[in-house]
Amino acid sequence: MLETTQMSPQGNERIVNEVCMAICTVNGSGSATANNILYRSLFRMGILTSGKNIFPSNIKGLPTWFVIRASARGYTGRIVHDDVVVAMNPATIQKDATYILDGGVLFYADHLEKPEIKDKEVIFYPMPIKALMKQVDVPRNLQSYMENMLYVGIVGQVLRIPEEILKATIDHQFRGKPAIAESNFNIVKLGFQYALENIEKKDHFYLEQLPELKDYILTDGNNAGALGSLYGGVQFCAWYPITPATSLVESAIEQVGKLRKDPKTGKNTCVILQVEDELAAAGATLGAGWAGLRAMTSTSGPGISLMTENIGLAYFSETPMVIWDVQRVGPSTGLPTRTAQGDLSMIYTLGHGDTKHVILIPGTVTECFEFGWRSLDIAEKYQTPIFVLSDLDLGMNTWVTKRFEFPNQPIERGKIVWEEKLEKFKDWGRYKDLDGDGIPYRTVIGNLSEKAAYFARGTGHDEYGNYSEDPKNWSDMLGRIGLKLNGVVKDLPGPIIRRAKADADIGIIGMGSTHDAMIEAQDLLAEMGIQADYMRVRALPANTVVREFIASHARNYVVELNRDGQLRQILSLEISEYSEKLISISEIGGLPLTAAWTAEKIFAKEKHNGKNR
Amino acid sequence: MEKTVELNRLGLALADYKGKPSTLCPGCGHNAISNQIQAAIWELGLAPEKVMKISGIGCSSKSPNYFLNRSFGFNGLHGRMPTLATGASFGDSSVKILGISGDGDTASIGMGHFKHVIRRNVPMVYIIENNGCYGLTKGQFSATTDQGLVLKHQGVNLLPPLDLCMEALISGAPFVARTFSGDVKQMKELIKAALSQNGVAVIDVISPCVTFNNRDEALQSYSWGREHEAPIQGIAHFSKREDMQVENFEEGTYREIQLQDGSYMVLKKIDKDYDPTDRHAALDLLTESYKYHYFATGLIYFSEVPPSIQAQYDLPEEPLNRLSSDRLRPSKESLEAINVSLY
């Protein structure tokens, strides 16, 4: 089987800054902090890295894996096998060891049963975790947490992370709490010293300092989305907890008090309200949007299902609101802690009757920030609900990402009219298209003009909002809404394109967080003799650049994490004259995409088509 | 000769508070409610622009069309009126909220939202136009339909009714009242009192459906209501204390309560002394009145109003929806600090 861009160790060769390490622990044991310290340390050494958390739908006691892939070449997407496994969970050590590559490494807590590995060469580093713990005085409730800190020191030393880097990372992690930082560092140092004095390095993996990654930060997509919304001037968010969207709003709750005080009065300018269910979340957000507030909510697939009726009302009453869907595996309750891209089709036409929605699809954490504020502008400008489609991998994992850029344009409120401007209109109606762009002028509560009020409704209405069952009225109204939203394309982010190094017959198309794997797949395919241009779609409806990309290739492989090839289906619909050029490559298991799988599938299809060079 | 039109303290006539002509059935109880809402708000001297009307779906929820053309309205989703009201209440908290719903809208699909909007104390007058049936879908049982009632096409209702005043009381509403479309004077005074509070006020209006549920023996019919109505007290609302001198009240027979906006409610004893601030008495009254099938109307429960949901957020005096954009975006420096902290 094709094994990606991993380099198999040969002889005395040093493999520098290219290592994939799986840390296998028990959830709820405090391993997350330890894992983050290792991860952050690599970042501070200037090495591009990813850290993916594979965790169960559970609070304590079940296995969890944290996979760090360091790659100075920039290939940080998921790979199936590991160079290094750090085994701390007796329940899974036998299976965990099967993922190690030939020539790889197994660090294991030595009170666990050493696995027998017959079919490959593995270097074993037993870690005397229990014995070392006896040397320190740690309260019982911090035992397992501190055991994890030991492996940070041991693994760090063997892979040659400088002690000062580990210390700096720990100081950053516990900034403001020097005593805690010190006690954590002491444990790490204990492990580090042990390794320095007792472990003879037999493996080939080395980490070396590179120039600082000073244009980058480390954070997760949900935090970025929360910040983007706050910098986008969000004023109201009603929400209901659901994995993996919860941390988006919780991040906003943590930061709203500091970031969103009115400069004039010192009072709060953003309300975040936890409500009784997703129907209330959507309904309250809609009510706020109608009342003239910039409004947003965040949920996952099951929540979107519940919000459907309210979204339809927002669509037809032409009320602005932003809905984040941090996708997880569906259908149904699905796999709440696994990632997917399976809500696209549902959201595209969410709601009974003719509804068609605007969707932004961020692929990086930085884009989560950017789309957080842009979505509010687009929603208000077009007076419509708009979706931001993220996923668990992007939202809940910490990524190395470009620094957040301050919004490069002022907040867009769209066509809201107050008393003075309203007086100037000769014949205003809430749903009258006065400018010819399909976007009416809207008034909001509190407007003191006698002319301002109108009766919003989901039922048929005329241009003044009056109830109407007239067939032409209905058809014209719905038609204008359709027209209005066709115009939105010019305000949507276009695709990101990475051209092949030579002329490419084929295109590979993706969306969202599969980006890193797609880039690696593109390069793998090149090594296999197939030149492919890569395009990452960032919004729907698709614009002309997307159309031209598809048109200009003989075949386009649409790669996505769902069963039915939803992006391919939608692109076929929108760009129907080229639909035979679109071929689906999709899978749904709940884990992030791998470049190897992608390249293999495309290679096989190309070969089948007789196009292999 | 010019006919003099009576004006309220804002210089507005009753006609300035009207809506569109009703398309409900002639004699519909909801029409009485619409008229009394219009009269109450006019008498209070509230500007129509300072009121908004939110409704769900049903005959009840069509009624906001028939009053206050100059007030913003939103005819939303079945059962979901409270969620719209919750969000809208933050747009401009100087605009009072009238939430109009029905027994289908509130007691079935909307039960969860009903309880939670009360629990949250969203400042609004929540009016349930209760006719014990589903009118707009033509005559199904609702959750407030009396047990044993027979309706055409439905047969016999085997299930006991929910009591929405009881539900409101249990959820912690600081103002719970029941009234009747056949007692418009009481209804109007209750609406005025409800609008004087900055919290949730629930008024369950028994509002007969003349088309589908008006048989003499039915709990929510005009005739049964008129025959069995037992007001628990007389109620009058006064915007100013001075106006109270106009009525001559006998010592010991009345109680005056000052409302949050400085206006007054006067409760006049009828036969028994009923203390609406006594929660146990209220629970007993509701239990007894269902058990013995008498129709208690009036102010059932009243308490000090807890802080409204807005009070929990320390918001500016100015309406949130009028804040200029420069007050909504944090500074460039603050983003730089965040970038530094995330390195």
Image (tube, rainbow, N blue to C red):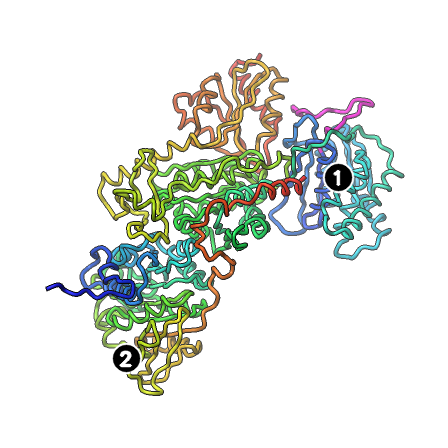
Q: Nearer the viewer, residue B141 or A92?
A: B141
Q: Which residue is mark 2?
A: B246
The answer to whether residue B132 is visible is no
| Residue B246 image point, x, y percent | 28, 79
Mark 1 falls within which chain?
A
What amino acid is at disc 2?
A: Val
Report, in whole angstroms, how far the alpha carbon at label 1 lies from the one at label 2.
87 Å
Q: Outermost residue, right direction?
A: A197
Boundaries of the magenta span: A1-20
| Element on which disc 1 rests | strand
Q: Which mark is residue A86?
A: 1
Write down the quadrant of residue A86 in the picture.
Answer: top right
Closest to the camera, between mark 1 and mark 2, is 2
| Element on which disc 2 rests | helix
Left or right of B39? Residue A357 is right
| Residue A509 image point, x, y percent | 52, 25
Write down the quadrant of residue A602 in the picture.
Answer: top right
Secondary structure mostly seen in the magenta stretch: loop
> Looking at the figure, which quarter contains the N terminus of chain B?
bottom left
What amino acid is at disc 1?
A: Val
